[in-house]
Image (cartoon, helix red, strand yellow):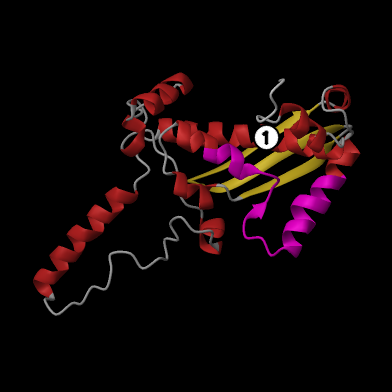
Amino acid sequence: DAMGMNMVSKGVQNVLEYLWGDFPDTHVISISGNYCSDKKSAAVNWIEGRGKSVVCGATIKEEVVEKVLKTTVSALIELNTAKNLVGSAVAGSLGGFNAHASNIVSAIFIATGQDPAQNVESSQCLTLFERDGKDLYVSVSMPCIEVGTVGGGTQLAAQAACLELLGVKGAGLETPGSNSRRLASIIAGAVLAGELSLMSALASGQLVKSHMKYNRSTKDM
């Protein structure tokens, strides 16, 4: 249930020390060659996956889209294609085919004691809006969510309390790795909700209005 980077480093260091016994002339430049692409957005992480790979999807009823989100299924699908797919491609985005996955990932990472810098690759996300009959199907594909529920910042009091609240604190005793996998799934679910919210605000023209209304610097909230 640990994220595992430090564990891998310790293992590699031990292997190197073993090899030096047989090959004393070995010259080691660094324990890391950067192919791991830690804390960097890279195609290898997008293709191969890193940490946990999660796909999360949900069907939103047409009446909910219209009454609650104040837009239409067609408008959301058109917006997702134009913004998250075409717009990101034109910008040359690498794994950034989403509206604002990083906002959600960063917040949960800080709250649960993850490495905030690993938000860079953990926020790689492909958001899709499709038709499911007359309803809307939303999905997010996140191939490299790097999380752990033991070690590091997860031991801090506030962060441990958040993990406890989510039901994923510590190691999964019955099934090793189950808590970290569940945390990754929670993050993907939260990202999906965030994508749906922001995209609906954009499609309905409410983004700037809501920012102005709920701006934290506004004194008369």
Q: How many marks?
A: 1
Left or right relative to 120: residue 162:
left
Looking at the rendering, the stretch of residues picked out in magenta corresponds to 78-106
Dot 1 falls on a residue whose secondary structure is helix
Rendering quarter of residue 151: top left
- The amino acid on which the numbered mark 1 sits, given as a three-letter code, is Gly
Whether 140 is drawn above or below 21: the answer is above
Judge whether residue 183 is colored magenta.
no
Whether 204 is drawn above or below 29: the answer is above
Whether 128 is drawn above or below 14: the answer is above
User: Residue visible at 59% across and 44% down?
Assistant: 102
Left or right relative to 50: residue 170:
left
User: Residue visible at 23% across and 53% down?
Assistant: 10
Q: Is residue 181 visible?
A: no
Rendering quarter of residue 115: top left
Is 33 or 135 nearer to us in this picture? 33
Give the residue at mark 1. Answer: 194
List x then y, in percent, for residue 156: 33, 29
Q: Residue furthest front?
A: 219
- Helix, strand or loop: magenta stretch: helix
Whether 218 is drawn above or below 142: the answer is above
User: Residue visible at 65% across and 29% down?
Assistant: 216
Quadrant containing the N terminus is top left
Is 215 or 7 nearer to us in this picture? 215
Judge whether residue 85 is colored magenta.
yes
